Image (tube, rainbow, N blue to C red):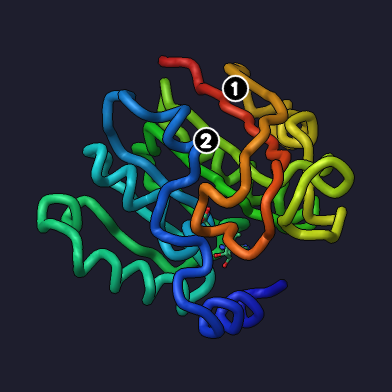
Amino acid sequence: MDSQDWDDRYAASELVWGVEPNRWVVRELTGRTPGHALDLATGEGRNAIWLATQGWEVTGLDYSAVALERAERLTADLPDEVADRLTWRHGDARSYEAPAAGYDLVLVAYLQVPAEDRRAALRRAAAALAPGGTLLVVGHDLGNLTEGVGGPQDPAVLFTPQDVLADLADQGLRTVRAERVHRTVGAEPGHKGEGGGVAVDALVRLERGAE
Ligand SMILES: C[S@@+](CC[C@H](N)C(=O)[O-])C[C@H]1O[C@@H](n2cnc3c(N)ncnc32)[C@H](O)[C@@H]1O
């Protein structure tokens, strides 16, 4: 799918992924000291908005202008102090140039693209980390095809935790976690319509050492 395909998909239905944040984002980041965060491929912004409610200053980037219009609309309904912490940017995750100061947190959630594009985006994400920063990558695991429900059915856009580690092997990051995790489908509005069951996700959390 290219950006036009994504625009069409977003235009075809209201809030494709829902407004609730992804459960792994909540599990991994609740209680963290807020700083500056980048949500690469933010979509309609559900995770970026949740981070802003937790006190993070968040930049949400996506190449779908339609998704970002949705995110802007959701932002308009937020309390001012939360809305003021959100910045939406139109751009390509594969070529994103972070400000020199970098981010304390970079999130890449459900960026289901061919391996070459994933690798490019993840390497931009790693490059965007400030010293001491956290990179959290979550997405549909390859094993979801045979063991889970829902999600993309094209193996070319699925990945494993090991794929993420291989993409970033030379980036000098410390691995905090790299695991397959199970998500009961139905509890997340973004995955309604998939029917009941358990989805298999890949979750990788990495850190850049403090300088
Ligand atoms: C499955 S959605 C996930 C959205 C969001 N991260 C979430 O979890 O709700 C994938 C998003 O990736 C975006 N995307 C795909 N390739 C991209 C790229 N190269 N640069 C920026 N955004 C991209 C799409 O436009 C889409 O919004």
Give the residue type that dot 2 points to.
Answer: Trp
Tell me if residue 130 comes above or below residue 56 in the rendering: above
Q: Residue at x 19, y 66 (%)?
A: 77
Quarter of the image with the C terminus in it: top left
**Horizontal and vertical percent position of residue 112:** 70, 55
Q: Residue at x 46, y 77 (%)?
A: 14
Q: Earlier in the sequence, mark 1 or mark 2?
A: 2
Q: Which residue is mark 2?
A: 24
Q: Secondary structure at mark 2?
A: helix
Tell me if residue 63 comes above or below residue 170 in the rendering: below
Q: Residue at x 38, y 47 (%)?
A: 99
Quarter of the image with the N terminus in it: bottom right
Give the residue type that dot 1 points to.
Answer: Leu
Q: Which residue is mark 1?
A: 173
**Horizontal and vertical percent position of residue 75:** 25, 64
As rendered, which of 163 and 173 lies closer to the eye? 163
Q: Image quarter for residue 182?
A: top right
Density class for disc 2 (Cα within 10 Å; few <14, some 14-19, many ≥20) is some
**Horizontal and vertical percent position of residue 61:** 45, 59
As rendered, which of 124 and 45 lies closer to the eye? 45
